[in-house]
Every structure is written in C-alpha cells, then in structure tokens.
Amino acid sequence: MFKTFSAIIITGGSSGIGKSYLEHAIQSNPDALICNLSRTPYFGQNRANVVKHITCDLSVGSAIEEAFKVLRLELDSQPKVGPILLINNSGFGAYGQYADISLEENLGMVDVNVKGMIHLTSLLLPYLKKSGGAVLNVASTASFQPTPWLATYGATKAFVLNWSLALNSELKSHGIHVMAVCPGPTSTQFFKRAGLTQGSVSPGMSMTSDEVVEESIQALKKKKAFIVTGWKNRLLKNMSSLFPRVIVTKISAYVIARYRTNTVKR
C-alpha cells in the first residue's frame, strides 16, 4: 500500500505504533519522501538514513508552523509530488481521576491529540488537494464510549474518530481518503506515559504495534472509513453499542478503575 505514495509523513514515528508505521514505510517504499515529525529522531536499525527527521513538539502551534516550513521545502523540492499519505499518530493519555490529573496534562492531551492533528492536516491540505492521497488518524477503542479514569484521553479520541469520518465524507471529491484507526491496548510506551505500570493489561488482551499497523494498512487498501484492530476489540465495541450510554459508562468505569492498583507516582 505504501508504494502508491510519493511522500509519507508520520507524526510520532520514533516509538510505538508510529515507529511501526515508519518501518513499514521504509521497507515498502524507501524511495518515497519519508518524514518523521517528532521531538526525537527515529533510531531504528532499519535504514534510518532514509527518514527525514523534522523536530516538532505537536503540542505547540508555533513549533508545528516551523516544522511545516521544513516539510514544505522537502515537498517542493521533489521532482514530482504524487499522492501523499499523512499519518497523524502522535498522542498520549493520562490515567486517574480527572481532579487528580493536572490542568497542564489535561490541556496537553487536547493540544497533542486534537489541536496538533487539526493544525498539521490543515497546513498540508493544499498539497493533498493538489496531489491526492490519504490521511490516517490514530484514534482508539476509547472513541466509542465515555472512559472514566481516562476522561480527557477518551474524549480526545472520540473527537479523532468523528472528525475523521466527517472529513472522509467531505474530501472524497478531492481524491483524499481519510481513515481512523482504533486500536485497543497495544504493547507500546502508552501505559507508562499514562502513569500505569508495565503489564497492566494482560498479553491476551493486547496487540503488538506491527499487528495494528498491518491490519490498518489492509483497511486503507479497502478504503474503509475506520478500522477497529483485533477481533476481541471489535467484539467489545459491538457489545458496547447494545446498551444505553449511561450503562456503558458505568461498565467502563468499573473495568478501567481496576487498573488503579497499577498506577505509578507522577
């Protein structure tokens, strides 16, 4: 799938799911312009020299503007810019009762998970309209129900899902496909960043980053509007849709609250 794009732009490609996307892109299409917008460079052993690192803090609007200046020069220097793939992957969560999480961290989740995604996509949109391509936004299974103990995180991911679906409908006429990827628990640094100990979720309920990426690539080929990765996650998502949202919220609160014994001090 990556071979169809002349430029592949990934946010947060230095670790986790973003790193897996980056490595799949390198392996499939090393001749493409591959850019990683992240605070830290990609240090993988798989042809890291192929990747153009653009330092960017996705929580800061001015940093996104400066990073886009570099990205624009890279795009404009290409002999011919064909379809572009933008993967908005950067994001983080914080676990705990809302009142116990700092205002700075709650606003930071909105800045990275929502504002950064909107900002970069908007800046890149003229190139996408001109050349066509796709936008892949990493949401979460938290998109489908309220998530007590992950209140702000879940709300930001619900925004990502609904925004992606709306944009996909609007931008089809411009040759731009937009898809939301909704992974469940994944073996990444997410839980550590959220304030949970390693192994908080059993291996039987989690997926690897590569599994998430491979499923989402197949879904992108099929022009799906969104994909819930993993059959267990799809089953849970479908079951949650059978009950009133108030009941789903209570169940969600019970399930997520069990992780409080695995929290670490911030």
Image (tube, grey):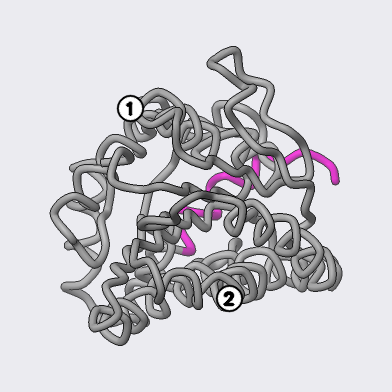
Question: How many neighbours does mark 1 have within 10 angstroms: few (below 14), some (14-19), or many (20 or more)?
Answer: few
Q: Amino acid at mark 1?
A: Gly
The x and y percentages for residue 116 are 66, 68
Q: Height in image: 87 above or below 4?
A: below
Q: Residue reaching furthest front?
A: 79
Q: Distance from label 1 to label 2 (Cα)?
A: 34 Å
Q: Nearer the viewer, residue 105 or 178?
A: 178
Question: What residue is shown at x 31% (from left), y 71% (from top)?
Answer: 176
* Secondary structure character of the magenta stretch overall: helix
Dividing the picture into quarters, in which one does residue 4 lie?
Answer: top left
Question: What residue is shown at x 36% (from left), y 57% (from top)?
Answer: 83
First in sequence, mark 1 or 2: give its number.
2
For this view, does 147 lie left or right of residue 54?
A: left
Task: Kindly identify which numbered label has been placed on residue 118.
Answer: 2
Question: What residue is shown at x 18% (from left), y 50% (from top)?
Answer: 221
Question: What residue is shown at x 67% (from left), y 49% (from top)?
Answer: 37
Asked if one can make out residue 263 in the rendered structure from this viewpoint, the answer is yes
Q: Report which residue position mark 1 lands on.
A: 204
Q: Nearer the viewer, residue 176 or 61?
A: 176
Disc 1 secondary structure class: helix
Read off the magenta span: 253-266
Q: Height in image: 236 above or below 209?
A: below
The x and y percentages for residue 171 are 32, 81
For this view, does 181 lie left or right of residue 195?
A: left
The x and y percentages for residue 185 are 44, 42
Asked if one can make out residue 94 in the rendered structure from this viewpoint, the answer is no
Q: Amino acid at mark 2?
A: Ile
